[in-house]
Amino acid sequence: MTAASLTAARSFVATPVRPIGSVEGQRAFAFRHAGKRFGDKTVLDGIDLDVPAGQFLAVIGKSGCGKSTLLRLLAGLDRPTSGSLSFGVEEEGHSRTRFMFQEPRLLPWASVVENVEVGLTGIATGSEARHRALDILGEVGLADRADEWPSVLSGGQKQRVALARALVGHPQILALDEPLGALDALTRIEMQQLLERIWIAQKFTAVLVTHDVAEAVALADRVVVISEGRIALDLDVPVERPRRRGSVELARLEGKILDRLFG
Amino acid sequence: MSFSTRLHSNAIGWLLPALIIAGWEIASRAGVMPANVLPAPSAVAEAFWRLTLSGELIRNIGVSTARALAGFAIGGSIGFALGLANGLSTLSRGLTDTTLQMIRNIPHLALIPLVILWFGIDEEAKLFLVALGVFFPIYVNTLLGIQSVDPQLVEMGRVYGMDRRALFFRVILPGALPAIFVGLRYALGIMWLTLIVAETISASSGLGYMAMQAREFLLIDVVVLSILIYALLGKLADSLARLLERLSLGWHPAFQNG
């Protein structure tokens, strides 16, 4: 990063490093000494994190360690109180960052397909929006439920609609805040496989906050452990995909992370 | 629920009123109920027919309905607008809510002497009272509805780039609608109540006036008829509100089986 772009980044205006185009080999976003305080309480402190475009990053930590705050900074829901966050690929960084919440947060008064169209706000309208929303609903396996109300869907199906809403605008960065935490174990594995499949197909940068170490090593290219507002461990997961759950390699990495969390 | 079962469950609601009227007719014919206390339903029906033929009934119902709707439109739209403003803006709420809550605690019918002094017994008096009566249920419930919209959905809307207009029409207003309907149905009840009291005390036309005139000439069948018509008009207004509710709240789990 040049001195000029650093200055620009400090003023919290995302700096285009390279023109929009192929995302391979570029940086998706970078935190530089980023910190966040709420009053006297320091939640994040001196975070340095460089994430290349297309990477699947998992962020792990105990409750209250600041991992959700990190995600909120990334999505523009909060601003860092010190340091900077800059985006590499897109000029208006946040507009191509999508957020998937812990809860589905679907509009109960809008049909499934209309809920997906919310993800195209400011991107597409009318029949084009409907067409794209139906396409992505097909990808998450809910094409036949497009006209139903969210209230008749199961928890896993609602979260799949939320995933479709997050992805329909083809975001460069997808921020996921424990979106699978409330699902039962089997639905959860199904959702993880769906997420991995769509990530491979669409090649966005994924940042998954989770408290499930097995989930993190099964999905991510890289796992970051946050402890007391700092990065305590930054670990690559060099395991070929498709990965086999419960394999020795994954178990070894899982053990290493758990040691760091509780050691 | 299929159409025939819905018809069935609606019909069952009319069973009790029908039985009461039948019992009442029998009691009157048997002489248990003297006609100068409560005339038989057949006598009331006769009065209905007589007044319908003379055109008096239709005219009075028309006058009362027009007053009710005009008062409702005025009070309801002010209440709705203020409810929206105070739900969306803390400044507006801080400025007006205390005053409105104080006024709310005055029974609006207690203002009748003052209203007669101001407006005499002209139309304005009735409109003013009805408007004041329907204002508060609409205001309070619109405000409550907006304040109870799930903040997580509002945050979701912001994150997905909705502007203020889209946020209002796609998230806040639909979220507040169930509470607004509660206010609407409550206000419709208050609308009839206020109008009838106002017409009974000071009017030269309308249903309440018709009942008071009948009292002076001891036409008890007409008095009873007026009271029954109030009941029917109230039920009609409530049914219309429920129909609207069902049409616009189809997404709500409470309306998906009804």
Image (cartoon, rainbow, N blue to C red):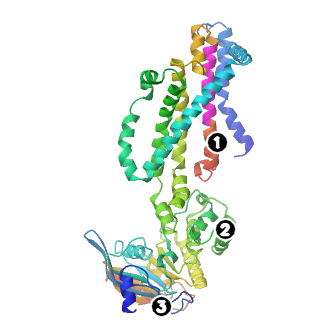
Residue linked to disc 1: B243
Instruction: Determine the secondary structure under disc 3.
Output: helix
User: In this view, which residue lies farthest toward the left?
Assistant: A40
Location of mark 2 (residue): A130
Are the numbered discs 3 and 2 placed on the same chain, yes or no? Answer: yes
Q: Residue at x 42, y 75 (%)?
A: A71
Looking at the picture, do discs 1 and 2 lie on one chain?
no
* Residue A226 placement (x, y as % from top left): 36, 80
B154 or B169, which is in the foreground? B169
The residue segment tinted magenta is B222-238
Residue displayed at 56% across by 14% down: B212
Q: Which mark is residue A183?
A: none
Q: Dot 2: few (<14), some (14–19), or many (≥20) neighbours within 10 Å? A: some
Q: Does dot 2 land on a helix, a strand or a loop?
A: helix
Q: In the rendered structure, the residue with mark 3 lies on which chain?
A: A
The quarter of the picture where the N terminus of chain A appears is bottom left
